[in-house]
Image: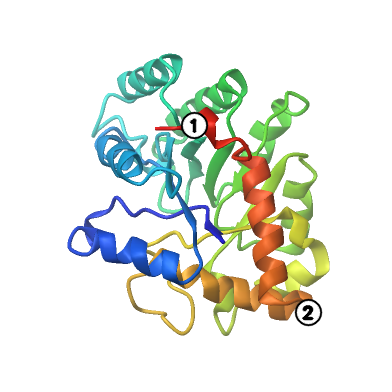
Amino acid sequence: MIDTHTHLDGDEFLEDFEQVVQRAQQAGVGKMFLPNVNEATWPRVFSLCQQHPHVLYPMIGLHPEDVNPAQRNVTQVLDDMEALLSQGIPVIGIGEVGLDFYWDETYRREQMEAFERQVGWAERFDLPLMIHARSAHRELVDVISRHAGKGLRGVFHCFTGTADEAEQLLSFDGFLLGIGGVLTFKKSSLPDVLRQSVPLSRIVLETDSPYMAPVPHRGQRNESAFVVEVANRLAEIYGLTLEDVDRVTTENAMRLFRLEDETTIAL
């Protein structure tokens, strides 16, 4: 099983990081993908993945909430990340990137420009995108549409939208939906959306640890071991065994991130 989105580099895991990784492995989660959010998190993301080869895998990118000119020189941060990619830094994806207009739209233009630039990296370096989008569905579709037909691929992280939104996002070949703990929430409409519009072949598992822990761990710090709860709920929704969900979603992630030949991303 693969947790395709977990922030194990966060301060929430400083005291028991090794135990968290061990618990995940004991639960059957053999691989965990670590998206990056800004220039400060990158060194730890990369270091942890170096310490756990073939278990933890890094991505590099600037999160939309960190596209804030009042806090950082956004152009310089992006220049530095692009330089690392040009030097061949071994990462499996561009992320966590995207658009977030949930709280305010003060830096709408800057977010759009940063996202467009990082989508360009995905094309140039042939890497999948790990996309965060909140209150920005139309803008997201507009950006991806402009790059359609160029071999772009990736994950629409933390999908919780409608059936129409799912169908619109999955009209882009090469993209999958990242499904996490919200699926297990009592009032979530996501189970019906998935039944109606989304084949299991277009889904990958994720936790977004330490956030959004699934039932029965809701309210706790989330961790990668809990992705099994998401897989169990998917098995119920699709009328499959847990083993079937594990196999299909693992194959989806391995294919999307091109990990069949892991020698290409050895750290």
Q: Secondary structure at mark 2?
A: loop
Q: Residue at x 32, y 24 (%)?
A: 77
For this orientation, the residue located farthest to the left is 15
Task: Identify the disc placed on residue 239.
Answer: 2
Q: In the image, is 116 to the left or to the right of 74?
A: right
Q: Earlier in the sequence, mark 2 or mark 1?
A: 2
Does 146 sit above or below residue 159? above
* Image quadrant occupied by the N terminus: bottom right
Report which quarter residue 40 is drawn in: top left
Colouring style? rainbow
* Image quadrant occupied by the C terminus: top left
Q: Is residue 255 visible?
A: yes
Q: Nearer the viewer, residue 9 or 245?
A: 245
Q: Residue at x 32, y 35 (%)?
A: 68
Q: x, y percentage for residue 246? A: 64, 65
Dot 2 amino acid type: Gly
Q: Secondary structure at mark 1?
A: helix
Residue at the spot of label 1: 265
- Marks 2 and 1 in Cβ contact (< 8 Å): no
Q: Residue at x 68, y 30 (%)?
A: 152
Q: x, y percentage for residue 47? A: 28, 39
- For label 2, count other residues whose C-alpha is less than 10 Å away and answer few (under 14), some (14-19) or many (20+): few
Marks 2 and 1, how far apart in space?
A: 35 Å
**Front disc: 2 or 1:** 1
Q: Is residue 138 visible?
A: no
Q: x, y percentage for residue 171? A: 80, 44
Q: Residue at x 62, y 23 (%)?
A: 123
Q: In the image, is 140 to the left or to the right of 81?
A: right
Dot 1 amino acid type: Ile
- For label 1, count other residues whose C-alpha is less than 10 Å away and answer few (under 14), some (14-19) or many (20+): some
Does 57 sit above or below residue 242? above
Q: x, y percentage for residue 129? A: 57, 37
